Amino acid sequence: MPALSPNTPFGAFGPADRRALRQPELLHPCALESWPIGERIMAMQTTAVRVLQVGCGGYGAFILRGLLDLQAEGLVQVVAGVDPAPRGAGAEVLAEAGLKAEADLDQALARHRPELVVIASPIHLHATHAISAMAQGAHVLCEKPAAGNLEDAQAMAAAARQYDRWCAIGFQWSYSPAVLQLKADIAAGRLGRPEELASCVLWARAHSYYQRNQWAGRAWLDGRWLGDSILSNATAHHLHHHLFLLGADGAAAAPDRMQAALGRVNAIDTCDSAVVDVMVGDTHIRHCASHAVAVEWAPLMRGRFSEGLLDYRPEAGGFIFQPRQGSARVYGDPEAHPHHKLRHCVLALREGTPIPCDVNCASVHLGLVEALQRPHDQGPSPAGEAPAELVGEVPMRGGSGLAVKGLEHGLLRCWANGAEAPAWFQKIGQSHYQG
């Protein structure tokens, strides 16, 4: 295994080194992810938590299936699904649950009196739906991003204070026992001083991805900032994750400085490719991402600490910390239990367990992305256009889409070796976080 030093590049671990980290005897206890949540809840009370879901199509159908799994365990009762026009998987799941979709949220809230409202509606409606639910006495779990803009997220936070409710945001990694243990260990100094965190997410997206609704890739909607992009939506989890790891308990760390290089290949208002650099104190965060590639890989993530290297390898157990001396610690894979946020919110209702990622925590990511993307007028976000000779139509999941020749290799170099963003990306000057 390579000798570790503060200057060890992210690419220092080779395949043989990763095989050495797969030994089951090295598994860290926190990787077991064996919280007996169901047993603890059922021991405390016999009444299932009454849950209403807003938005049942698209990703909402996946969330609804997770709620039905909890219902089968007796932990929740799904009392209603609110969606004015459920289609496809959403309509199928509602039918399986024996529920008819309801069109009016306020009427459904008054009729069913839920304790928890899960919001998976379009991003620009998050604030309206969350505030209505809290005003009617329900706690909220809202899908990421928190809202379309920072102003809406701040209104959600104000409503939570006014009505004495919590408003959780569904960055599912932030609810994972593996990530929560890793965050606690970083805060306690068990990994040493955090020096650098980096991620690279290469997810091809076909034309159908941007045609699925009226707001995909839009900078503005009805005269209000929306900023839907690869940074605010598809790879929001990974950028938020770095800030979350560096924050205090239940919080994300606010950036001190930030800059970006943004690219646009598809016919959208925002960006579909980006390299973002953030400084939190002395810790450097780099996030590289693109939809305009011909590949779709699992997220690549690394961290360099004064006492060793942090690696994310799903095939080897998830997050792995290799200290300078001693055995590797395997924390587990946050992707192993994507519905853990639902369980956590049920536990929060019954035991008062703190919400690890509320709207205030998630607003740090929202404010960062808005500061980098939002123009001074109501035009598109600043982004460089790829040279036409490099762009081609390629097969992708969901049809075909545009990809830039060699872009995946360039972004991998940005992630692994600290290389500059491709020359055609537009650089966004250094900014100060205003969230």
Image: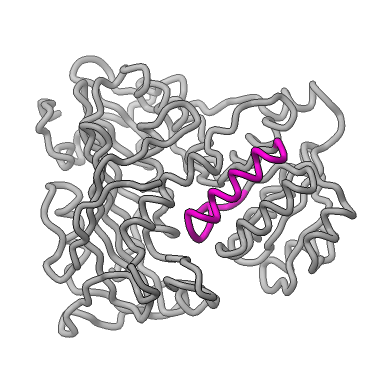
Residue under the point 11% across and 53% down: 419
**Residue 101 in view here:** no
Report whether 72 appears left or right of 370: right
Total tally of numbered discs in the picture = 0
Residue under the point 56% across and 46% down: 170
Residue under the point 45% across and 19% down: 29
Q: Range of the magenta residues?
A: 142-164
Q: Main secondary structure of the magenta part?
A: helix
Tell me which corner region of the image, top left, top right, bottom left or bottom right, holds residue 409: bottom left
Tell me which corner region of the image, top left, top right, bottom left or bottom right, holds residue 404: bottom left
Does the magenta-highlighted stretch encompass residue 157? yes
Can you give x and y, in whole percent of width and height, for residue 249 in the image? Answer: 47, 26
Residue under the point 60% across and 25% down: 35
Does the magenta-highlighted stretch encompass residue 189? no
Can you give x and y, in whole percent of width and height, for residue 418 in the image? Answer: 13, 48
Furthest-right residue in this view? 111
**Residue 13 in view here:** yes
- In the image, residue 250 above or below residue 363: above
